[in-house]
Amino acid sequence: RIKQIVLTLRFVFWSSALLGALHIAIWHTALAGLADFLTGDWYYPVTFVVYAQFALMLAAALFVMRSPLLWAIVGACNWTLNTVLQWLFVAACTEFNAAMIAWNAPERQVELGMTVVFAGFWTLMLVAFWFAVAQAARVQRLLAENPELAIVRQRFDPQQRVAGGVAEHTRERRRRESGAAWRARLRLGGAVAAGLALAITAIWLLTRPPKVDAAVDAFAASWQSGDLAAIDAMLDRGRIREGVERRGWLDAMPALGERAIEASGRAAVVRYPCDDDELVLRYRLADAVWQLESVELPPYRTPPLEPALERFRSAWNAPGTAAVVEQFRPDLRERFGPLFEQICEKRGWTERRPKLGVVDPGRVRNGGASVLFELGADELRLRFEYWHPSWQVTGLVPPKG
């Protein structure tokens, strides 16, 4: 029983030393790019910890036969630290994902599935090591009570060896026991590895997010049928009806090309060729459901703004206010028309208004433009928006006075 406990401890420490060597290899290869982001205050301590853990496990594997309890406690403390750090990392990733959702950047979230699996594995190893401490304490007590059960083997003097004697029989017996022990450890290691593989696969299958394809198919069906109400119901925020109406697509929605899906963790971006450009959908995974966050329609295909500015100048210079009111978007005329007439009546502009001077058309962005007309010593501010098939006034700010 003593031999079984101590040799198992030694096997576990050799496995931990091998894992530490793997950590060193990963740190210097796969994660070498982190050196560009970590300052010296972080990179060198992490490197020290990686090497120190390997050296500690190697020393434990070499000397656990002499002091089982001491090295079992050292291993348990090491795994306790690793487990705490692993769960702190999981908590930090969870907070980071919450911050990314709050900052409207779900595509930058970290996938937590395998991280939680590794944290669970570390926790199981922690429990196993503290159980090993209890067993090592029992071994230490038995060795103190029975010194003849020494684990460290004494070598026979070659001159005292006798052919067919006790030493030779003991050596043969130990060779057989050692072979049987290694075969048992290999079987145990294989069973543990297979069990872990099955557990990790099962957890991955149960926790993996659903594919975004079903949500994308539902959007495509609603788009082709022109069901804007269904698309608005899918959207987490905003509506697309205004953008579709401004582009003149209410009667016939443009066809969508072959989609390209870029899924990363809890976020997905879908791109459709549409209207000689592309339609972009952004999804995020919330409670195992893909939520459509935004729909980026293709850019507006706007005609030149200058003819619309000249039409407004002609309407401004025309007698009365009807021609100016006609420049407003139709659904705004009933609301803005009386307000504009009141402004003109208050300033004596009902029949004639001061001539408009130099115009600053500004920049056309997302189908809109902020325009400034010189008006005497002041300026007249206008907001033009493209509503298929022409530019229309959607805002007017007269000079102060």
Image (cartoon, rainbow, N blue to C red):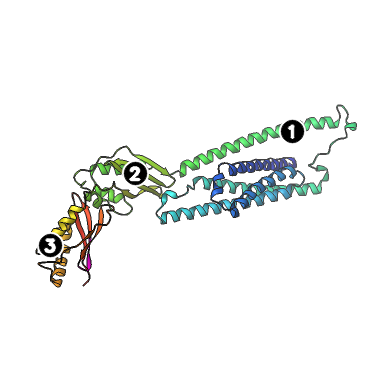
Q: Amino acid at mark 3?
A: Asn
Q: Nearer the viewer, residue 156 or 187?
A: 156
How packed mark 1 is, by other alpha carbons closer than 10 Å (few <14, some 14-19, many 20 or more), is few
User: In which quadrant is the N terminus drawn?
Assistant: top right
Labels 3 & 1 near each other (Cβ < 8 A)? no
Which residue is under mark 2? Answer: 215
- Residue at 29%, 38% (x, y): give it: 257
Foreground of the two, 358 or 208: 358
Nearer to me, 289 or 134: 289
What distance separates the C-alpha of mark 3 from that of mark 1?
A: 109 Å
Question: Residue 177 placed where, x, y %?
Answer: 74, 33
Residue beneath label 3, please?
317
Of the numbered discs in the image, which one, if any, rests on residue 26?
A: none
Badge 3 crowding class, 10 Å Cα cut-off, few under 14, some 14 to 19, many 20 or more, is some
Tell me if 388 is positioned left or right of 220 in this view. left
Give yes or no for residue 375 being in the magenta stretch: no
Mark 3 secondary-structure assignment:
helix
Q: Which residue is mark 1?
A: 177
| Sequence-earlier tag: 3 or 2 | 2
- Amino acid type at mark 1: Glu
Q: Earlier in the sequence, mark 3 or mark 1?
A: 1
The amino acid type, in three-letter code, at marker 2 is: Ala
Q: Position of residue 371 (x, y in %)?
A: 24, 59
Q: Is residue 340 visible?
A: yes
Left or right: 200 as drawn, with respect to 397: right
Between tags 3 and 2, which lies in front?
A: 3
Secondary structure under the numbered disc 2 in the rendered image: helix
Q: Nearer the viewer, mark 1 or mark 2?
A: 2
Q: Is residue 96 left or right of residue 269?
A: right
Residue range of the region highlighted in magenta in the rendering = 376-382
